[in-house]
Image (cartoon, helix red, strand yellow):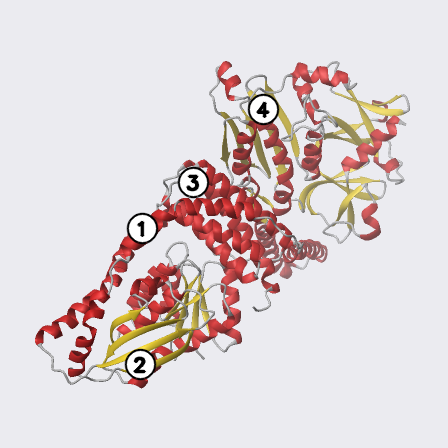
Amino acid sequence: MDDTSKYRDLFFEETDEYLQTLNDCLLQLERNPQEKSILDEIFRAAHTLKGMAATMGYKTMTELTHSMENVLELFRSGVSSINTDIISLIFSCLDKLSEIVEDLRIEKEVEYNIQDLLKKLDNVVNGNSNSVVVEKEITFSVSNDEISDTDSRVIRSANEKSYNAFNLAIRLSKTCLLKGARSYLVVNKLEQQGDILQSDPSAEKLEEGDFDDVFKLIYLTKLQEEDVKEIIEDIAEIEAVIIEKVEQDEIAITEALVEEVVQGKEEVSSPSELSQNKANKKEGSKKEEKGNVHQINQSIRVDLTRLDSFMNLVSELVIYRTRLEDLSNQYKTTEINEPLEHVARITSELQDLVLKIRMQPVNVVFNRFPRMIRDLSQELDKEIELIIEGEETELDRTVVSELGEPLVHLMRNAADHGIESAGERLAFGKSKVGKIKLSAYQEGNKVVINVSDDGKGINPEVIRESANRKGINTRGLGERDLVQLIFNQGFSTVKNVTNVSGRGVGMDVVKQKISSLGGSIEVNSEVDKGTTFVIKLPLTLSIIQALMVTVGQETFALPLGIIEKVVKVQQEEIIKSHSNEVYMYREKAIPVIRVNEKLCVESTRDNMHIILILLGEQHYGLLVDDLIGQQEIVIKKLSGVLSDMREYLGATILGNGDITLILDVGNLCNEGAGGKLE
Amino acid sequence: MKRVLIVDDAIFMRMKLKDILEKNGYDVVGEAQNGVEAIEKYKTEKPDLVTMDITMPEMDGVAALKGIKEINSAAKVIMCSAMGQQSMVMEAIQAGAVDFIVKPFDSDRVVESLNKASK
């Protein structure tokens, strides 16, 4: 086999897609077991997987997919019907396959125990094998006994009409895989120029490939020996052919015998007529198939790093465009203005485009949930329906790929803690089947993802109790605030840890992850009605709206998303409290952080601006000297030594070519809070 | 140089096949990922040979073969099949497929088939 290493990436990418298709379709199939088109698609995906795995030389994977295909074929041909056990069995095969694929991806050599699965699959096949055989026998029951009875006379009569009769012995090559089809091809080619009178083994065995490497034919044709030889040798996978002319007998023939030639001919050709009928039937069903099949888009695959560097280059283009515009204004070069405007338009189009290219539908994350909820509902013995909306909503690729983990957590929570058992639900007068809804939509330059369930909701009093036990102060907190406490570190209200969710680490991790993506999460819950988590995420991570401020001689950028308000303050409005400074905002004292002190920048200004930041539930005030304005900036990550500086998110290059640091407000404030404890 | 059209729904398979063919002096003039595309490409490219996968979405290989044969009854189409598709292969042969190759592809076997078919 050829060197396959260069196809590895492609193989894994496509394999992932096919596994996903299989998962999706199986779920659909479970709901509509009668839907033939779904079954066809499953079959096709399994089949393609098998072919790909075999080409890569992955034996275990090939073996497993092959057995799966055998089982699927039974359903496709209508021999067996589908039930939940079978679906579960195929699901476990898929899980095994994913496992194998993951190990192959990291080139780990593992011996898999797939014998169990193979055995189960085989049992399914064997349980039905009798009926399969019967079916085949009906299809190919035409025998050629009569021809062999009369063949000598036929040959004589044919010779009279200048036909030649040949005894052929054909040996197929040892590696020939579909012997039946191969011999069929030989017979078919020969029949274009003459007639096959007799075959050994019989035609049906020939078609089934039920013979060793050699088969024999008696062939009647007007062609000469050499021509026959050439026809056969031009067919692939033929190792050798022996041709012997049948000697002519001088016995005269009668008209009746000639008729027998015709009759014999008809008998031979009838199996192919049968398969013709079958073909017609198949064609009919195939037409229905069309509608439901996945539409394949015209697309190419691009290495992500190339896309990233494309993005970077475009960002740089934007920077220099701005720089050019500045220069043009400065030197009042009006001739340059017009082309520059074009450049400006094109670069912003480019920028939009590259952002769009990086977008991925949230579907990529969502599509794992139907399967997950199915498994969970079986595991937890609850009836759960999952509704997914807005799966086509797009987000930056980086955001999408980071989203999986927190969403899995939320979904598991909803299934485990949210939805009640069927009995409880009925007792509460709710419908027996619990609903979990996952929806996504775009709102301005943010994408909102909601995870909601109609389960028992979060009881604020339980939270309060639990918080008090853990020493968290809950005084003065409203019901809504109490519920938000679940995002606190090490907070879990479940007494028993199940293997589905709830180990006391969780919601805080979810929150951290979402925050690190520049997003926010909040929870709304009503006791006995249900819980909704609202996640808001930025469309993209690399271009943000920022507020430009000055501190002393320096300019800094602050991400606009977290800024709640900017207020001009006088020195006396900042109050000393213990060793810290606070600012009264909505009758609450909020800690003040002097950016100049934090960053060791000299500043002598007295009247300053305070920027009110909302981080989660806590307000902070950042003191800066002056505001410059709002601007769209491209975040460049700091690298090397600079990447250790936690105060900065990154840097950006401004229109005038200056480099400006972007403040990591979260880290600034947290360190500020840390200082407070000392 | 013989001009070949490759039809398969898996990019992986198309790449693999293309690689084998190009190494052995064939000119791959087009690729199609389903039967409908295959017929379209056949019309525009008029290739000397077509390799045709059997299981594909939209329109399967056997239907596409029939479509191509309607355009040109002398068209040379080689079916790409997998184990267990014997009846489909037979149907294809009945419909005029010149040969078939079985996955996983063995390059020698593929080349033998194309060489013989293009005679």
Q: Is mark 4 on a helix, strand or loop?
A: helix
Nearer to us in this view, A95 or A535: A95
Q: Which badge, 2 or 3, is on the more N-terminal residue?
A: 3
Q: How many labels does the image show?
A: 4
Crowd around label 4: few <14 · some 14–19 · many ≥20 (10 Å)? many
Tell me which amino acid carries mark 4.
Gly
Which image quadrant: the C terminus of chain A?
top right
Between the C-alphas of marks 3 and 1, the distance is: 27 Å
Q: Which residue is drawn at 16% across and 68% down?
A: A263
Q: Where is residue B100 in the image (x, y as percent from the top left)?
A: 40, 68
Q: How far apart are marks 2 and 3 (CA)?
A: 51 Å
Q: Relative to the observer, which residue lies in front, A654 or A226?
A: A226
Query: Which of A451/B88 is in front?
Result: B88
Q: Name the residue under label 2.
A: A228
Disc 1: which residue: A134
Q: Depth-wise, is mark 2 or mark 1 nearer the camera?
A: 1
Left or right of A312, for residue A41: left
**Image coords of residue A359 (percent x, y):** 58, 47
Which dot, 4 or 2, sits closer to the camera? Answer: 2
Residue A565 visible from this viewpoint: no
